[in-house]
Image: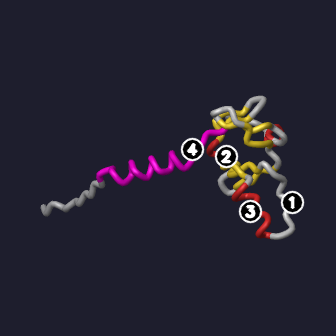
């Protein structure tokens, strides 16, 4: 799914169940990974770090929960990114490790 960042601002956000969650005011972007991390449903106009942290923790939605973006944004209650990362970790833990040792033959 690709969309312009500017198209996200002001869009209404709804849960899968149809409940209005809010509107997109700000986006938190991870520049190293090149992806959106979080959408806030309240402007990040904080006077202190504590206020900003409160807005991010209370009034934000991890972008991994986004299911669809069209005229509105639909979010699930489960963060797909975390779910996928956990599944990948579990697969790696259950994957057998193979160790090879090669011995030279003497001539």
Q: Position of residue 69 (x, y in %)?
A: 72, 33
On the question of residue 2 being in view, the answer is: no
Considering the numbered disc 2 on the image, is that residue within a helix, a strand or a loop? helix
> Tag 1's secondary structure?
loop
Chief secondary structure of the magenta span? Answer: helix
- Give whichever of discs 4 and 2 has the lower sequence position: 2
Residue at 72 percent of width and 52 percent of height: 60
Task: Specify the quadrant of the image occupied by residue 66.
Answer: top right
- Residue bearing the label numbered 2: 63
Residue at image mark 3: 54
Q: Which residues are magenta?
A: 75-96
> Could you tell me how far apart the alpha carbons at marks 1 and 3 are, in whole angstroms?
11 Å
Report how far apart the C-alphas of labels 3 and 2 lie in the structure: 18 Å
Q: CA distance from mark 4 to mark 2?
A: 11 Å
Badge nearest the viewer, 4 or 2: 4
Q: Pinpoint residue 55: horizontal percent, then vertical percent.
A: 76, 59
Find out whether residue 70 is within the magenta segment. Answer: no
- For marks 3 and 2, the one nearer the N-term is 3
Residue that label 1 marks: 45
Q: Answer left or right for 94 relative to 39.
A: left
Which numbered disc, 2 or 1, marks the residue closer to the eye? 1
């Amino acid at each position: 799914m690709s969309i312009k960042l500017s198209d996200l601002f002001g869009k209404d956000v709804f849960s899968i169940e149809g409940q209005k969650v809010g509107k997109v005011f700000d986006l938190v972007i991870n520049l190293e990974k090149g992806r959106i991390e979080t959408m806030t449903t309240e402007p990040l106009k904080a006077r202190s770090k504590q206020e900003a942290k409160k807005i991010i923790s209370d009034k934000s939605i991890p972008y991994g929960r986004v299911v669809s973006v069209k005229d509105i944004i639909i979010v699930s209650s489960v963060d797909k990114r975390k779910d996928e990362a956990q599944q990948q970790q579990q697969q790696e833990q259950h994957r057998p490790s193979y160790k090879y040792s090669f011995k030279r033959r003497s001539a």
